[in-house]
Image (cartoon, rainbow, N blue to C red):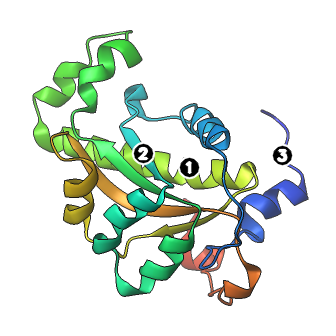
Amino acid sequence: MSESLDSRSLDQLFRTARTQNGWIDKPVPDALLKELYDLVKMAPTSANCNPLRIVFVRTPAGKEKLKPALSSGNLEKTMLAPVTAIVAYDQHFYEHLPKLFPHTDAKPWFTSSPAFAETTAFRNGSLQGGYLILAARALGLDTGAMSGFKNDLVDEAFFAGTTYKTNFLCNLGYGDPSKVFTRSPRFEFDEACRLE
């Protein structure tokens, strides 16, 4: 991993990639969603905890189940998106550490401190959600991450009886360039960073 990606790849991942607000009518095959997860799962998490859980909502019935939780500003674009990923995290991720982190008995690190477990689950689930966006872009998909929804309604509709909690939603598909907003400003290095 000593070589930088070429400029075209960096554009696709970062510089020209945009948050999508509209979609062309082109399906996302299930095989591509599986390929997407196979990339996401390889990215790092602390103690290999992998708390990310995803529901890929892609059927009309699934979209109707999701619809009541959406804010008015996110409704149309989510109903029209080929796929909406419900990006969630498992609050009891540590139950799987004997499999995922067999080097040591790490489960007590988290069972002894619910607050530490929750922070770890949310932080690492958020990291994995970011990896999901980059992996989707790397595979030629456009993305539209959102936080305009009612978490409790999504949890009730999709995760009742589990230890999973919704973090954010991310529409996936092939974007309609006419629906993209003008890019908003970003901070310059000296506004956001310092060297010590």
Q: From the image, which quarter does the N terminus lie in?
A: top right
Q: Residues within 10 Å of mark 3 (few under 14, many from 20)?
A: few
Q: Which residue is mark 3?
A: 4
Drawn side of residue 122 relative to residue 142, left or right: left
The answer to which of marks 2 and 3 sits earlier in the sequence is: 3
The mark nearer the N terminus, 3 or 1, is 3
Secondary structure beneath label 2: strand
- In the image, 86 versus 101, the foreground residue is 86
Task: Tell me: residue 95, above or below residue 50.
Answer: above
Q: Nearer the viewer, residue 25 or 129?
A: 25
Q: Which residue is mark 2?
A: 54
Q: Specify which label sits upstream in the sequence, 1 or 2.
A: 2
Instruction: Place residue 53 in its image quadrant.
Output: top left
Tag 3 near tag 1, CB within 8 Å: no
Residue shown at the point (65%, 88%) measured from the top left:
181
Observer-nearest residue: 28 or 113?
28
- Who's the residue at 53% across and 77% down the image? 77
Q: Residue at x 70, y 69 (%)?
A: 25
- The secondary element bearing badge 3 is classed as loop
Q: Nearer the viewer, mark 3 or mark 1?
A: 1
Q: Can the viewer see residue 7 in this picture?
A: yes
Q: Nearer the viewer, mark 1 or mark 2?
A: 2
| Of the pair 86 and 108, the residue shown nearer to us | 86
Is disc 1 placed on a helix, strand or loop? helix
Counting from the top left corner in percent of width and height, residue 106 is at: 26, 19
Tag 1: residue type? Leu
Amino acid tagged 2: Ile
User: Which residue is at 12% across, 39% downward?
Assistant: 114
Query: Contact (CB < 8 A) between labels 1 and 2?
Result: yes
Q: Which mark is residue 132?
A: 1
